[in-house]
Amino acid sequence: MVFDLAFIWAGLIAFAVLVYVVLDGFDLGIGILFLFSKSEQDRDLMMNSVAPVWDGNETWLVLGGGGLFAVFPLAYAIVMPALYIPIILMLLALVFRGVSFEYRWRTTRWKSVWDMAFFGGSAVAAFCQGIALGALVQGIEIADRAYAGGWFDWLTPFSLLTGFAVMVGYSLLGATWLVLKTDGNLQVQMRRYAVYLGAATLALIGLVSLVTPFLEPTYYDRWFNLPGSLWTMAVPALMLILTWSFFTSLNDGKELQPFLSALGFFLISFVGIGISFYPMIVPPSLAIWDAAAPEKSLAFALVGAVILVPIILAYTAYAYWVFRGKVDPRQGYH
Amino acid sequence: MEGHFDQHGDSQPLALFGVPNEEEGRLDYAIEVPYLGSLILTHTLHDQIQGLNEFPKEEWPPVAIVFYSFRIMVAIGFAMLALGALGLLARWRGKLYDWPWLHRAAIVMGPSGFVAVLAGWITTEVGRQPYTVYGLLRTADSLAPVEAPAVATSLVAFIIVYFFIFGAGTFYVLRLMNRPPVVSDPDLHDGPTRAAGITPAPQLDSSFIPAKEETDHGV
């Protein structure tokens, strides 16, 4: 392992993507759960529970994408054409989802239209993110430092599986977030959903984990070679502990622990993906150092990141602190 | 951008308007202010910038687009200044709240900021053609390996989605504008205390308060 600028930047980008998944995952999940809400009042509550924070969460998507563009231009130039369709779809979906936060409160006749825009936008965005993840894991064809595959290389049974898995996983985050932020009937409903969604998420994580080592010989070696496997065994072991923590806390009526445990599922899965990937940034053949921008650009951009990332983290934490506690049904965000 | 094709006499005028003629390499029907071009571009009275005709034609951006979009941006900028000056004049004469033509002009100018920004954007983006990175990378060489139909499809999708979203948004904004301002908190008949100058019109002049509000307040 070489600890240089390219490595630090790969870590920063991975961090940005992880924070994005942790923060935006639950609000996309709430959009997906919108379809299953029982009343107008519940929908208002669900939306208000994320309204003050959702757009800040998407900062990290921009940081991940913008950072990739600045410091790993080759990876950016290969991944974007390879994932052109899912990424465009995701952006369009985020447009619908974003405006529905504002428009929904401005109309009565079209309220259901914007409800559907919120659900559809969230579901499609989550699905496309999962597809992008799956397409990256299964590997991207490169020739002459450019994407060499076709239009629909990203569309495989495996990427559909990861797309579905991310949708279900985000719904789980949304449900546990609502357990934390609401009470009464909505909380009871979400607590019930969280049990099913938790089981489904774990099953899908298991399925994806079983398939992944067989996609690339490198992945297989990472996970099944002694004595290295003794280290990688920590991943499934931690997952088991989190599973126990999730279901017992949900059962005991706790409010924060199920949400944190569900976030833990994502964190551990993310680490697992990292173990498979490293040192590639675009599997199977593009390594972190091959894709990096010149040393000078890396250093220059790092100065900005070192100043800005802590500031963003601080104000994000402050925003969550200000809006802590249950959502007040009488108080709108507007 | 300047519509400057050739070096002129001993100084460069500033072309206010004209019709760029790219075939002949000149500015037709030009209305020009002498010396001003030299003053703005070189900060002297007589120095000149290189004219377009000194560059090979394949290095030219589409001249007409840049020429007009820049002038649209500048014209809107001056219109904004004029509106601000009119507002000051109205304030000075004590007519800021009852000069309907000023209010109409302000409403018409509402979208002008967007138009000016778009025109300026077009000026920079078209003006740097045929390069993506000036002198280093031509636009034609910087394409991603995405097939044209895929790009066309996504472009059409964005156009449809934007028209739909902006259409709905414009509708809601116009509907909001169509409603008279209301003080939503019943305890605050007169609204919160504000600094001089930012107090909304309805709080200053009772003739602006709609009829219904007047009876409520027993005015």
Image (cartoon, coloured by chain):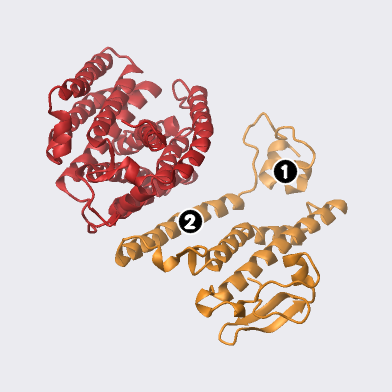
Camera-nearest label, 2 or 1: 2
Identify the residue at horizontal 79%, vertical 55% (top origin): B87
| SS at mark 2 in the image | helix
Dot 1: within a 10 Å radius of its alpha carbon, few (fewer than 14), some, or many (20 or more) residues? few
Q: On the same chain: label 2 and label 1?
A: yes
**Residue labelled with disc 2:** B166
**Residue labelled with disc 1:** B200
Residue A91, x across and y down, in percent: 38, 49
Taking depth in this image into account, of B27 and B176 the one nearest to the observer is B27
Q: Which chain is red?
A: A
Residue B28, x across and y down, in percent: 66, 85
Q: Quadrant of residue B140?
A: bottom left
Amino acid carrying mark 2 in the image: Phe
Q: Quadrant of residue A21?
A: top left
Residue A145, x across and y down, in percent: 30, 54
Taking depth in this image into account, of A287 and B204 the one nearest to the observer is A287
Residue at the top extreme, as displayed: A252
N-term mark: 2 or 1: 2
Can you tell which mark lies on residue A226? none
Indicate the chain on which mark 2 is placed.
Answer: B
Q: Colour of chain B?
A: orange
